[in-house]
Amino acid sequence: MPELFISAFATLFVVIDPPGCAPIYAGLTKDATAAQARSMAIRATAIAAIILTGFAFFGEDLLNALHIELDSFRIAGGLMLFWIAFEMVFEKRTKRRTERAEKVNADPEIEDVSVFPMAMPMMAGPGAIAAIMLLMNEADGFEQTLEVFAALAAVLILTGLALIAAGPLIRLLGDKVEAVITRLLGVLLAALAAQYILDGLRGAFGLGA
């Protein structure tokens, strides 16, 4: 198996983190039906693929044209994720869930989390964007470029499958266990958000590791 494919797969798998995204997605789609959750998982994966492919080809030029540094992406993404984590831990979403439950028979529409926060910044976040841009810089020629995209496709397919499977597994555990897991995942998501912000601040101010 080509070396660059292995390197790219390992890098993207760690950065995108399918096992980490899946339970968070399950917590965010608690009120969704199986079909709605599956549809959002597929849509999130497709949108993340489009974003990362776009940044692979045009990311550096786009950021330079807009005078945006990648560290700014890290800080902004971290702040947005922290807000989601806050709501998960303190159950600020409970009232909205109750109101939606009362209206579900008349209006099956639920909150769509496929674009935010799943596609971006969870899957196609600053880390993944930076990784795909660096990997594209390492690719020498058409074949190695294909290796990078094959690795990206493999990781995104695994992520999509993990998102689809996570909801049913967590629902089997029951409401009490699910509530505990959701709060725990909220804390972990808050830590991830804080890490994004710290990384962005280090990069912006040249503070080092």
Image: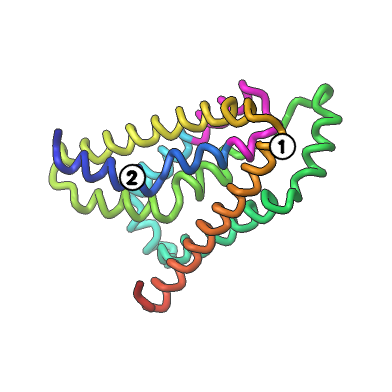
Q: Nearer the viewer, mark 1 or mark 2?
A: 1
Observer-nearest residue: 75 or 94?
A: 94
Which segment did they paint magenta?
Answer: 26-44
Question: Where does label 2 land, which residue?
Answer: 12
* Residue contact between numbered discs 1 and 2, judged by CB atoms under 8 Å: no
Disc 1 element: helix
Residue 58 lies within the magenta run: no
Q: Residues within 10 Å of mark 2 (few under 14, many from 20)?
A: many
- Amino acid type at circle 2 is Leu
Please name the amino acid that badge 1 sits on. Answer: Lys
Check residue 28 for magenta coloring: yes
State the quadrant of the N terminus: top left
Which labelled disc corresponds to residue 21?
Answer: none
What secondary structure do most residues of the magenta stretch adopt?
Answer: helix
Above or below residue 132? Residue 97 is: above
* Residue at figure coordinates x 40%, y 60% from the top left: 63
Q: Is residue 173 left or right of residue 10?
A: right
Q: Position of residue 57 (x, y in %)?
A: 31, 47
Crowding at dot 1, Cα within 10 Å, few <14 / some 14-19 / many 20+, comes out as few
Relative vertical location of residue 78 with respect to residue 171 in this rendering, above or below: below
What distance separates the C-alpha of mark 1 from that of mark 2? Answer: 34 Å
Q: Which mark is residue 176?
A: 1
Image spot of residue 148 (x, y percent): 25, 41
Residue placed most toward the observer, 39 or 31: 31
Q: Is residue 88 left or right of residue 136?
A: right
Pick whichever of labels 1 and 2 is earlier in the sequence.
2
How far from the left and from the top, in percent, is residue 50? 42, 39
Q: Residue at x 45, y 39 (%)?
A: 19
Under circle 2, the secondary element is helix
Q: Quadrant of residue 10 in the image? A: top left
Query: Which image quadrant: the C terminus?
Result: bottom left
